[in-house]
Image (cartoon, grey):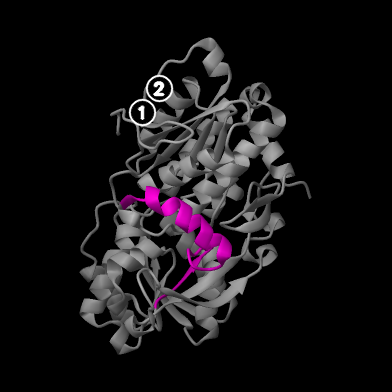
Amino acid sequence: MDIGRRALLASGATAVAATTLPRLSRAQAANTIRIGVMNDMSGLYKDNTGPGSVASAQLAVSEFGQHGFDVEVIFADHQNRPDVGVNLARQWYDQGVDMILDVPTSSVALAVNQVAREKNKACINVGAATSDLTGSQCAPTMIHWAFDTWMLARSTGGAMVKTGGDTWFFITADYAFGHALERDTALFVRAAGGNVLGSVRTPFPGTSDFSAFLLQAQAARPKVLGLANAGADTVNCVKQAAEFGITRRGTKLAALLMVIGDVHSIGLNAAQGLVCTESFYWDLNDGTRSFTRRVLPRMPNMQRPNQIHAGCYSATLHYLKAIAEMGVAESKRSGTEVVSRMKAMPTDDHCFGQGQIRQDGRKIHPSYLFEVKAPSESQGPWDYYKLLQDTPAEEAFRPMNDGGCPLVRS
């Protein structure tokens, strides 16, 4: 866990890496909103979340401006471990953190969600994918922002079957996220008339050599190899599949959770033709391009933001709007009341446009199915996606009454 303390980003607020927070006077504490960005700062999801999520939250704070209260952004590395995430969440909430943001890795997210419920503190999840967060594990203190496994499965899985990819084999990360993504995608494949030939689960974290798993998948001769993993695992799978020539033998790769930074790491030669779903693309429209221009100087290595980074910006901005409306003192009394106020307010920002937050905590907006361009199609740096189809907001996510969330009144 990162416990060094340093100034990270200027203009409007301080961002520090901390597990023990700086002491504030009673007056300062009463008028300061503390946001804790918890994610993978050093492991296989670092590029997909990590410092980019902190930078995006910090930009939102800076652009929100002065509204009569101070905002402090802190961050720490949960190491993709539920026990680390739980301990960190308890420390932060006990020391005055008002909202925890991001929390990729579904096993960590589910655990931190329970701490937030117990402490009656707000938690806005952006980087974890499991749709259980707005299903059986929904909580009145939690909002799920950018994407989830149901959305990814519907868009990517359903589209592949419609274009002839009716036999599937899954390579699945062996933890809550991978299980949920395989489960949700398999439901859509079968509903569309396809078949699942099998699956293999890979140890998480720690797998870098996927050759044995790829050979097992190849032996099943599926039309589609579904990669129910993310980050460096997806990058390594795609690169090694290209080395084995799997796609040349007639199998299509479906990266069920891939973001633009993964494509950059893989390279267009190996990634071309891959399909994936995101709720944000930096070059999608004038709004996404405007956000990208503003956040780019803060991003590590000038990487283009993905749907998680955009989600951290969007969620932070909406959270601060709710605080300004209800007042700092009231917001500190109850995370449930903060989340309730956020649900009552329509969302609107450059990253996702207009949207809303449902009773089950699901933030809804359109989703987009992309295909990775061939090198000859790319017009410049990070010009990687071509849009195949979009799904409107009211259809992109699981119907609220189907999720089993106990907050939903029938």
The single residue placed furthest to the top in the displayed view is 26
Give coordinates of residue 55: x percent, y percent.
42, 44
Give coordinates of residue 121: x percent, y percent.
57, 30
Q: Which residues are magenta?
A: 274-300
Label 2 – label 1 distance at C-alpha: 6 Å
Residue 10, image quadrant: top left
Q: Which residue is mark 2?
A: 21
Tell me which amino acid carries mark 2.
Leu
Question: As drawn, is 400 to the left or to the right of 369?
Answer: right
Question: As drawn, is 21 to the left or to the right of 403?
Answer: left
On screen, residue 303 above or below 158: above
On screen, residue 17 above or below 138: above
Q: Can residue 398 be seen in the rendering of this structure?
A: yes
Q: Nearer the viewer, residue 129 or 178?
A: 129
Q: Secondary structure at mark 2?
A: loop
Q: Secondary structure at mark 1?
A: loop
Seen at 39% across and 37% down, the residue is: 9
Seen at 47% across and 83% down, the residue is: 165
Q: Nearer the viewer, residue 296 or 204?
A: 296
Give coordinates of residue 388: x percent, y percent.
53, 79
Q: Nearer the viewer, residue 74 or 61?
A: 61
Q: Residues within 10 Å of mark 1 (few under 14, many from 20)?
A: many
Question: As drawn, is 304 to the left or to the right of 355?
Answer: left
**Mark 2–mark 1 CB contact (< 8 Å):** yes
Tell me which amino acid carries mark 1.
Ala
On screen, residue 248 above or below 121: below
Q: Can residue 138 be seen in the rendering of this structure?
A: no
Give coordinates of residue 236: x percent, y percent.
26, 65
On screen, residue 355 above or below 378: above
Q: Which residue is mark 1?
A: 18
